[in-house]
């Protein structure tokens, strides 16, 4: 049986506060630049994958769209 977590507890509030402080620190180190932040988190992800300690979910590649059967010139197809 799993233990229920009280999301409104003082302990949980402290965890959330700490996570937010760390995110702000990382953002400041990246000059609040979204592209630098993305690169930072991608690099961290690569390093964590290499350790083999964590499991990652890789999203399915987008399905290819079927070729359109519509005419591009506004004419009816034969």
Image (cartoon, rainbow, N blue to C red):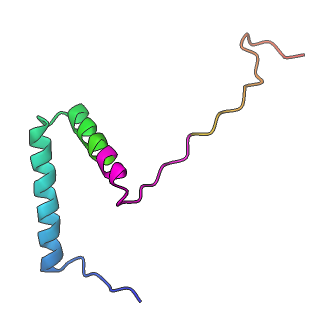
The residue nearer to you, when weighing 66 against 58, is 58
Instruction: Determine whether, in the image, residue 58 is placed left or right of residue 36.
Output: right
Instruction: Determine whether, in the image, residue 58 is placed left or right of residue 22.
Output: right
Which quadrant of the figure has residue 6? bottom left
The residue nearer to you, when weighing 14 against 8, is 14
Total numbered badges shown on the rendered structure: 0
Can you say whether 15 is above or below 25 in the image? below
What type of secondary structure mainly makes up the magenta span? loop
View extreme (front): residue: 51
Residue at 46%, 54% (x, y): give it.
Answer: 57
The residue nearer to you, when weighing 6 against 25, is 25
Residue at 9%, 48% (x, y): give it.
Answer: 25
Can you say whether 23 is above or below 5 in the image? above
Name the image quarter holding the N terminus.
Answer: bottom left
Residue at 80%, 12% (x, y): give it.
Answer: 75
**Is residue 69 covered in magenta?**
no
Q: Position of residue 24 (x, y in %)?
A: 12, 49
Give the residues in magenta.
46-61
Q: Position of residue 27 (x, y in %)?
A: 14, 43
Residue at 16%, 60% (x, y): give it.
Answer: 19
Can you say whether 43 is above or below 8 in the image? above
**Is residue 60 covered in magenta?**
yes
View extreme (top): residue: 73
Instruction: Determine whether, in the image, residue 7 is placed left or right of residue 61.
Output: left
Q: Position of residue 18 (x, y in %)?
A: 12, 63
Q: Position of residue 71 (x, y in %)?
A: 76, 16
């Amino acid at each position: 049986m799993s233990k229920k977590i009280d999301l409104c507890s003082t302990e949980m509030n402290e965890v959330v506060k700490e996570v937010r402080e760390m995110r702000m620190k990382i953002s400041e180190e990246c000059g609040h630049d979204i592209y630098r932040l993305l690169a930072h988190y991608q690099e961290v992800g690569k390093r964590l994958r290499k350790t083999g300690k964590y499991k990652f979910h890789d999203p399915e590649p987008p399905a290819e769209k079927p070729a359109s059967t519509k005419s591009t010139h506004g004419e009816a197809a034969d």
